[in-house]
Image: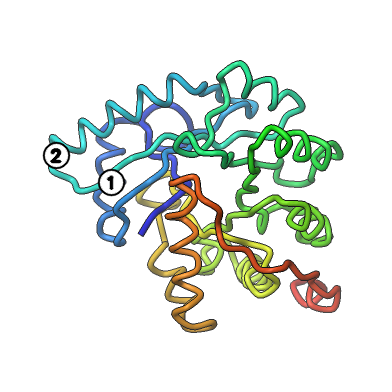
Amino acid sequence: MIDIHCHILPGVDDGAQSLSDSIEMAKRAVEQGIHTIVASPHHKNSRYENPKKEIIDGVKELNEALRLEKIDLEVLPGQEVRIHGEMLEGYELGDILPVNHTPYVLVEFPSNHVPRYTDKLFYDLQMKGLVPVIVHPERNQEIIERSDILYQLVEKGALTQITAASVSGDFGKKIKNFSLQLVEANLTHFIASDAHNVNKRSFKMREAFGVIEKKYGIDMVYYFDENAALLIDGKHVYKEDPERIKRKKLFNLF
């Protein structure tokens, strides 16, 4: 299993606070069946700056520590980039780090809205050969209320990643139901942990895929698993035509 979004690098954001925390997270990941993790610390949000070079150096050090501990887990470099108007400039200056040096960039929206410049920014990123991957859209209040915003972005080439804990129900019934609606409407392409620690914000990957398999069958599990592998290799991921979520279904969330 591959986890494309995890805050396992020590001491750089609100994830692992120390190397020992990172080691504990790595052990828990292996217990979940994860063999590869993308370290994706926050970048350009209100609290954290984690430019490309610092992340690459940190990933190298963490992989060395994992080898010494004999933990069978590989960590790849990535970044969770809070959306901002200068993202393209940041990429050209070498501060923005796509997942494992591929074209795929993890993009985070504010929790309560989608900035009005998103459509234009995503167009500009794609013209430069980058593919924006919207992380945890199921927890964005405006997208929950107006899912057509996400449909429009996906239709124009963006991808999305929902959080395993959302699917497993750890963020509540409303978010779980909305997450499953995104799956059904072909509005998401990856499931990842967004794990920050081993307590309140752990991996939940095995639990999420259990829900997916029970509701949609093993083929859907393979779909998400294969897409994660394609992403870290920089290859084209599988996509089905997105569908709009009917407003009647949205109202049933509340």
How many discs mark residues in the rendered view? 2
The quadrant in which the N terminus is found is: bottom left
In the rendered view, does 246 fall on the left or right side of 73? right
Q: Which residue is mark 2?
A: 69
Mark 1 to mark 2 CA distance (whole Å): 10 Å
Say which element carries label 1. helix
Which residue type does callout 2 highlight?
Glu
The quadrant in which the C terminus is found is: bottom right
Say which element carries label 2. loop
Camera-nearest residue between 185 and 44:
185
Name the residue rendered at 73%, 67% in the picture. 242
Query: Residue 85 sits in which quadrant?
Result: top right
Can you give x and y, in whole percent of width and height, for residue 6 in the image?
Answer: 44, 44
Can you give x and y, in whole percent of width and height, for residue 65 in the image?
Answer: 20, 32
> Is 183 placed above or below 65 here?
below
Numbered mark located on residue 26 in the image: 1
Camera-nearest residue between 203 and 187:
187
> Is 173 placed above or below 120 here?
below
Other-residue count near label 2 (Cα within 10 Å), few / some / many at <14 / 14–19 / ≥20: few
